[in-house]
């Protein structure tokens, strides 16, 4: 029997994946239990959710009474989404963050120069999104917080140094390390078929120093070792045109569209759009603006690709990138 999960349920599930503390997980799981359709087809999932809820409650309690040992980093999401930058030592992670944001991470031509994660804001056209630089992941170097950063991000960038013969092996090691912790860099983000322990993260595979004449040969070596599920993007970070392409690809990782808004009787606000998932509706827009608006909104007027000249539409009308919306 199919589970027939609703879009609201999927949204709650996505929030659960990105929850950064046990207490947040408890809240998300409660919401998922409320939203999951109650019938035979979801019996097993309901049982699993209840089990998860109990575990999360215990973990939240434990965190309260005895804070976890070891460092932990939590970075509240900023902008349209959170993208974690991962890679082996010296693969260009910090250089990438330095070039695309106004943060100043340490960039050095020796390995293990980054010791702590660093969040930074990238501006692309009229949207902002968050990049997180991280220390390298190797066979012998992986802190639990690094796994958490990957599992709770919206998407990832995997850096591969196109100029180093060590890159193929270093990348295999990194992917293996993540996989052992049930975290898979993949083409889309989400749980693996209703299994709440295995997580996939949508990933852009970036070959830095991509102008190196042997870069593509090194990528071919990697492909011989593993089934690589991504198309490589070759970039030379010295090169401005390459950086622009890279920024566009990073924004596209988020699968979102931009929506401008206006209040009735007021001019449109084209300065900072809201972002909602591709295929998102008027209701999704209201949800990101304000809980109250989400509840009280009756209809909307839309100017743009999805509707013309201020046409009146209902809550479930699907919006397109750069539509202008007036909520009523
Ligand atoms: N010319 C050029 N240099 C690059 C490129 N990417 C990285 N580099 C250089 O490679 C070296 C290592 O870059 P980092 O950004 O520090 O590497 P990392 O992945 O952050 O290294 P760790 O923090 O040690 O893991 C630096 O000297 C960078 O300037 C690129 O696309 N072009
Ligand atoms: Mg670094």
Image (spheres, rainbow, N blue to C red):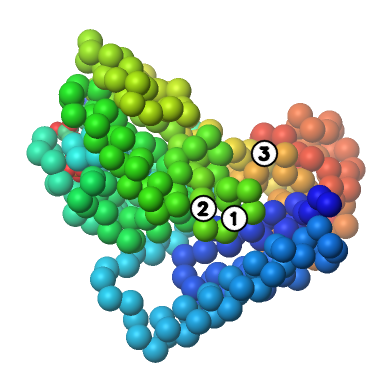
Residue 195's disc is 1
For mark 1, does the 10 Å Cα neighbourhood hold few (<14), some (14 to 19), or many (20 or more) residues?
Answer: few
Q: How many marks?
A: 3
Residue 264 appears in the picture as rendered: no
| Res. 97 image quadrant | top left
Nearest to the observer: residue 217 or residue 24: 217
**Is label 1 in a helix, a strand or a loop?**
strand
Nearest to the observer: residue 163 or residue 226: 226
For mark 2, does the 10 Å Cα neighbourhood hold few (<14), some (14 to 19), or many (20 or more) residues?
Answer: some
**Is label 3 in a helix, a strand or a loop?**
loop
> Quadrant where the C terminus lies?
bottom right
Estimate the x, y position of residue 167 in percent, counting from the top left: 23, 29
Verify CB contact (< 8 Å) between mark 2 and mark 1.
yes
Residue 65's disc is none
Q: Which residue is mark 3?
A: 278
Left or right of 155: which side holds 300?
A: right
Estimate the x, y position of residue 186 in percent, counting from the top left: 49, 37
Q: Residue at x 72, y 44 (%)?
A: 280
Left or right of 300: which side holds 274?
A: left
Q: Residue at x 58, y 62 (%)?
A: 16
Q: Residue at x 29, y 20 (%)?
A: 221
Q: Which residue is mark 2?
A: 198
Q: Among all residues in the image, which is located at the extreme left? A: 110
CA gap, disc 2 to disc 3? 24 Å
């Amino acid at each position: 029997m199919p589970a027939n999960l609703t879009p609201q349920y999927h949204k709650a599930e996505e929030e659960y994946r990105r929850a950064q503390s046990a207490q947040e997980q408890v809240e998300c799981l409660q919401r998922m239990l409320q939203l999951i359709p109650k019938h035979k087809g979801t019996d097993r999932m309901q049982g699993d959710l209840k089990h998860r809820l109990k575990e999360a409650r215990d973990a939240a309690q434990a965190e309260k009474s005895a804070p976890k040992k070891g460092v932990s980093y939590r970075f509240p999401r900023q902008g349209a989404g959170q993208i974690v930058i991962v890679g082996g030592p010296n693969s260009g992670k910090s250089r990438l963050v330095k070039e695309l944001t106004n943060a100043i991470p340490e960039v050095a031509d020796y390995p293990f120069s980054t010791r702590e994660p660093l969040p930074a804001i990238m501006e692309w056209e009229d949207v902002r999104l968050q990049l997180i630089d991280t220390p390298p992941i190797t066979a012998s170097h992986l802190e639990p917080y690094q796994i958490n950063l990957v599992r709770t991000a919206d998407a990832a960038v995997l850096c591969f140094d196109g100029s180093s013969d060590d890159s193929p092996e270093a990348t295999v090691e990194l992917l293996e390390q993540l996989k052992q912790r049930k975290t898979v860099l993949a083409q889309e983000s989400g749980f693996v078929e209703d299994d709440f322990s295995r997580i996939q993260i949508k990933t852009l595979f970036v070959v830095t120093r991509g102008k190196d004449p042997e870069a593509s040969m090194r990528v071919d070596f990697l492909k011989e070792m593993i089934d690589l599920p991504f198309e490589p993007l070759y970039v030379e970070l010295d090169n401005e045109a390459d950086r622009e392409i890279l920024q566009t690809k990073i924004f596209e990782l988020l699968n979102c569209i931009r929506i401008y808004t206006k209040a009735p009787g007021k001019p449109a606000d084209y300065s900072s759009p809201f972002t909602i998932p591709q295929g998102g509706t008027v209701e999704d827009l209201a949800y990101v603006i304000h809980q109250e608006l989400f509840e009280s909104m009756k209809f909307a007027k839309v100017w743009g690709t999805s509707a013309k000249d201020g046409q009146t539409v209902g809550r479930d009308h699907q919006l397109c990138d750069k539509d202008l919306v007036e909520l009523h």
